[in-house]
Image (cartoon, grey):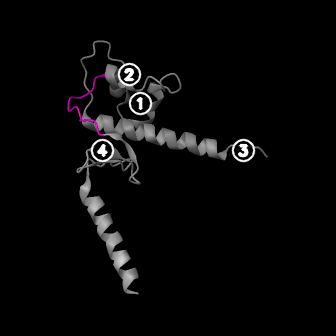
Amino acid sequence: MKERYEKKEHERKQREALEADKTDIDPITGNFTSKSDGMRYDSYGVLIGIAKKKDKKSPTGEVVRETLKDILPLVSLLEISNQYWVFAHEIYDKLNDVDNKTKFTEQEIKELRKALYDISKRITKAADLLYIR
C-alpha cells in the first residue's frame, strides 16, 4: 500500500515539474517549449523539434502567402476572408499586398491560424464520414 502511494506521489511530482518547465504554450495546439532544454514538444510531451526564436516583427502579406503556398491552390483566400472576418476585404488586401508594405497584427495572425485549424477540422470530419457501403 505504501509503495503504491509513493509511486503515485512520484508521478504527481513529475507532472508538476513538467508543467513548471513549460513556456511559450500555444493556446490552439497545446505545443510548448521546455525551459530546461529549449526544445519544442507537442501537447503530449513528444519532441517535435528545436524551438525557433520568435521574430517579433509583424509578417507582411508576402510572408504569409509564402507560408501558405502549399494550400493556396486548394483554398480560396477570398472565401476564408469572407467566412472568418467581418472586414474581409482588409485581410484579403493584406494577403494580396503587391507593395509588401502592409503588416499583419498579432491578432490577425491568431485569427488566421484559428481559421486554418477550423478548416482542417472540417476536412478531417468530411474525410472521416466518407466510407464505402
> What is the x, y in percent for residue 65?
38, 22
Q: Nearer the viewer, residue 18 or 123?
A: 18
The reply to whether discs 3 and 2 touch (Cβ–Cβ < 8 Å) is no
Q: Is residue 98 left or right of residue 57?
A: right
Query: Residue 90: where, in percent of width, then height?
Result: 32, 26
Q: Are discs 1 and 4 less than 8 Å apart at CB?
A: no
Dot 4: within a 10 Å radius of its alpha carbon, few (fewer than 14), some, or many (20 or more) residues? Answer: some
Q: Is residue 90 visible?
A: yes
Dot 1 crowding, Cα within 10 Å, few <14, some 14–19, many 20+: many
Task: List the residue tagged with mark 3.
Answer: 131
Of tags 1 and 3, which is closer to the observer?
3
Sequence-earlier tag: 2 or 1? 2
Distance between the alpha carbons at the discs numbered 4 and 2? 25 Å
Compared to 115, does 101 lie above or below? above
Image spot of residue 33 (x, y percent): 29, 47
| Residue type, label 1 | Ser
Looking at the picture, which amino acid does disc 2 mark?
Glu
Front position among marks 3 and 4: 4
Residue 66: give its label: 2
Q: Marks 3 and 4, how far apart in space? A: 39 Å
Q: Given contact means CB atoms under 8 Å apart, are the residues at marks 3 and 4 in contact? A: no
Residue 71 included in the magenta stretch of the image: no
**Magenta span of residues:** 51-61
Looking at numbered disc 4 in the image, what kind of residue is underneath it?
Met
What residue sits right under mark 1 in the picture?
Answer: 81
Q: Earlier in the sequence, mark 3 or mark 4?
A: 4
Position of 1 with respect to 10 (left or right) is right
Q: Nearer the viewer, mark 4 or mark 2?
A: 4
**Residue sticking out furthest to the front:** 3
**79 or 127, nearer to the observer:** 127
Separation of marks 1 and 3 at Cα, in angstroms = 31 Å
